[in-house]
Image (tube, rainbow, N blue to C red):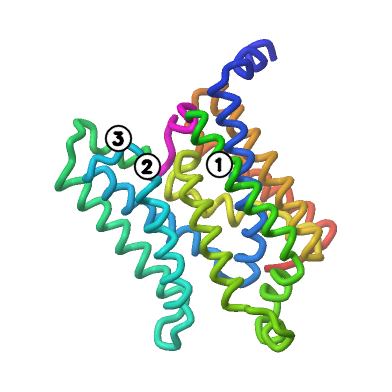
Amino acid sequence: MDKLFLYLKYPFVQYALIVGVLIALCSSLLGVTLVLKRFSFIGDGLSHVAFGAMAISGVLGLTNDTLLVLPITIVCAILLLKTGQNTRIKGDAAIAMISVGALAFGYLLMNIFSTSSNLSGDVCSTLFGSTSILTLSKNEVWLCIVLSVLVVIFFIMFYQRIFNVTFDENFARSAGTKVDMYNLIIAIIIAVIIVLAMNLVGSLLISALIIFPALSAMRIFNSFKSVTVSSAIISVVCAFTGIIVSIMAGTPVGSTIVAVDVAVFFVCFIVGKLKGGMRV
């Protein structure tokens, strides 16, 4: 405990915990909606797009890759939503096309234009997360705080409409809800969260932050509200625990957080078997 309290005094640890908790909170709120809409892998697809965008920013030598990665990821989120509504190309096929293409394109660029002596290490840290979460600047922390607050405010203000869009788009449309607009906003917010989460868990593990807390909560609770609240609590606790364990044990941050999420899911699965909960 003395060692833990000593680490908590360092600003870089405090920054990592703040950003990790905020990202986990935002991803869990919209994760319930994505899981229920059977669109869980949008996070996986967009994370691969972010990887490709990071490769492009590396080739261009940009010092702040967020300025390029964020717009590209948002544009692809919009394209993914529009393509998924095409009767010829279903949502899962659109995600597969964009994610695989972006991942291959990004890795190709990193190989052709690489200026690093440790290409495999750079690729591995980008895909699975690295210690960059522990080197956040104040500006990056404040950016995360502002965007996270906006996401939470949006979710609270439009909770009922998000609920309607999640469960029955046709009914929501007949009731006057602009379904396409809300789907578009949700896709854009997910893109923002993914770009912020790249430093936390890496591009290949981002979807775990979206899927596992929601599925864990659904093992136990039945209503949308209770699932959403419990998912947020589970996600925040897992992220906090994962970061602390990672710092104390010297393990990769992203993999440790996901491992904690998996462990909690199995606990919730057992509890759900005994109690009975929502099945998705």
Q: Position of residue 85 (x, y in %)?
A: 48, 81
Q: Secondary structure at mark 2?
A: helix
- Where does the N terminus fall, quadrant-wise? top right
> Alpha carbon of mark 3 to alpha carbon of mark 1: how far?
26 Å
Provide the major secondary structure of the magenta segment: helix
Instruction: Please report the residue visible at 53 percent of the width from the left and 23 percent of the height from the top.
Output: 12
Type of residue at label 3? Answer: Gly
Tell me: 162 left or right of 67. right
Q: Position of residue 152 (x, y in %)?
A: 68, 52
Q: Is residue 56 above or below residue 4?
A: below
Proximity of marks 3 and 2: CB atoms separated by less than 8 Å = no
The numbered mark at residue 126 is 2
Of all residues shown, which one is farthest toward the right?
275
The residue beneath circle 1 is 144
> Alpha carbon of mark 3 to alpha carbon of mark 2: how far?
9 Å
Q: Position of residue 114 (x, y in %)?
A: 18, 41
Mark 2 against mark 1, which lies toward the viewer?
Answer: 1
Within 10 Å of disc 2 (Cα), the crowding (few <14, some 14-19, many 20+) is: many
Q: Does label 3 or label 2 sit earlier along the sequence?
A: 3
Query: Which of 52/179 is in front?
Result: 179
Within 10 Å of disc 3 (Cα), the crowding (few <14, some 14-19, many 20+) is: few
Q: Secondary structure at mark 3?
A: helix
Within 10 Å of disc 1 (Cα), the crowding (few <14, some 14-19, many 20+) is: many
Instruction: Please report the residue visible at 30 percent of the width from the left and 35 percent of the height from the top.
Output: 121
> Alpha carbon of mark 2 to alpha carbon of mark 1: how far?
19 Å
Mark 3 against mark 1, which lies toward the viewer?
Answer: 1
Q: Which residue range is magenta in the image?
A: 127-136
Query: Which of 75/41 is in front?
Result: 75
Q: Is residue 135 above or below residue 105?
A: above
The residue beneath circle 3 is 121
Query: Which of 82/214 is in front?
Result: 82
Type of residue at label 2? Answer: Thr
